[in-house]
């Protein structure tokens, strides 16, 4: 295929992806009571699943401080167009999240013909693992990071006379940022997988720069979370665990690459840092 043919092929993949996002966004827009009333506003209510689970855990451990019995804040709208704008924005975000598996599948359909047979074979199941990790990150961000961050920030007061009256835009943007950031951060093993396939990253490299990675992860966590240490640590811990998993992923990839070069090419592997 010529360069223009590749561009045409890419255009149709993008068109189909955008069409999926539009359709799912419209469905989310029509499901206002579910998407906005129950899902987005869920962490703002004490009957949310996470708060109920913490209360049950507090009874088992006899640690009453874990139970969230009150969220001392109200959500207000101070702009004439804010409710309608947030309705559209939250519907688009919901459409992107729901369409993510299809979007990546379209992307994979575009790049997979350009891979060698052994690369396609080694990358089998990429759509499943990317979707699984994204869903795991979204779940973590929604059920753990968001409610715990909201509970901490809304119960933090400089003085009892100061009331927490939160603007609708601030609340929605915070929840969306926490959820989407978690979904993207959980893609770390997939990124390391492809970088290892390209020969850019090795297990030894990841081990040597582990301390630097910890600092970077903490900085990124501080950027994407509200300004409280607890939320930063909460999102940093699973990312650090994923970093350690990524080392093993890279080790597995390079072993497979070395085996391929030795068996099929009868030459030593270009990457020999397996341990």
Image (tube, grey):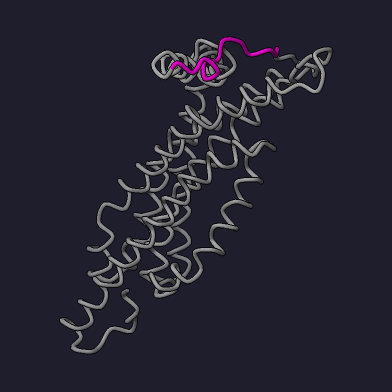
Instruction: Give the residue drawn at x 39%, y 64%.
Output: 194
Instruction: Give the residue drawn at x 59%, y 32%.
Output: 176
Q: 236 or 23: which is nearer to us?
A: 236
If the image is split into quadrants, where does the N terminus sit?
bottom left
Is-magenta flag for residue 58?
no
In this view, the residue farthest toward the front is 62
Q: Is residue 31 visible?
A: no
If the image is split into quadrants, where does the C terminus sit?
bottom left
Q: Where is residue 54 in the image (x, y as percent from the top left)?
A: 46, 19
Is-magenta flag for residue 68?
yes
Q: Is residue 51 visible?
A: yes
Q: Is residue 196 left or right of residue 74?
A: left
Reply above or below: 161 against 168: above
Q: Position of residue 168 (x, y in %)?
A: 70, 20
In this view, the residue farthest toward the left is 263
Residue numbers of the magenta segment: 62-74
Q: 154 or 113: which is nearer to us?
A: 154
Q: In this view, does 273 lie to the left or right of 211?
A: left
Res 135 quadrant in image: top left
Instruction: Give the residue drawn at x 43%, y 32%.
Output: 139
Q: Position of residue 248 (x, y in %)?
A: 33, 61
Reply above or below: 207 against 23: below
């Amino acid at each position: 295929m010529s360069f223009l043919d590749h561009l045409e092929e890419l255009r149709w993949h993008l068109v189909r992806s955008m069409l999926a996002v539009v359709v799912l966004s419209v469905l989310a827009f029509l499901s206002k009571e579910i998407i906005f009333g129950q899902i987005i506003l869920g962490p703002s209510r004490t009957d949310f699943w996470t708060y109920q689970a913490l209360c049950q855990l507090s009874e088992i451990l006899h640690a009453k401080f874990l139970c969230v019995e009150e969220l001392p804040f109200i959500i207000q709208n101070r702009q004439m167009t804010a409710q309608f704008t947030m309705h559209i924005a939250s519907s688009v975000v919901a459409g992107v999240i729901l369409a993510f598996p299809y979007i990546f599948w379209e992307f994979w359909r575009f790049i997979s013909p350009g891979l060698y047979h052994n690369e396609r074979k080694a990358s089998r199941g990429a759509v499943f693992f990317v979707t699984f990790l994204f869903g795991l990150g979204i779940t973590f961000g929604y059920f753990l990071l968001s409610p715990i961050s909201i509970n901490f920030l809304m119960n933090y007061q400089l003085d009892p006379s100061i009331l927490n009256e939160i603007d609708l835009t601030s609340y929605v943007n915070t929840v969306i940022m926490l959820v989407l950031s978690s979904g993207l951060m959980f893609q770390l093993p997939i990124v390391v997988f492809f970088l290892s396939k390209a020969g850019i990253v090795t297990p030894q490299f990841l081990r040597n720069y582990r301390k630097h990675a910890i600092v970077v992860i903490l900085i990124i966590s501080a950027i994407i979370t509200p300004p409280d240490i607890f939320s930063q640590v909460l999102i940093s811990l699973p990312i650090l665990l994923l970093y350690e998993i990524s080392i093993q992923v890279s080790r597995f990839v390079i072993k497979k690459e070395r085996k391929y070069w030795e068996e099929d090419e009868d030459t030593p592997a270009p990457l020999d840092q397996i341990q």
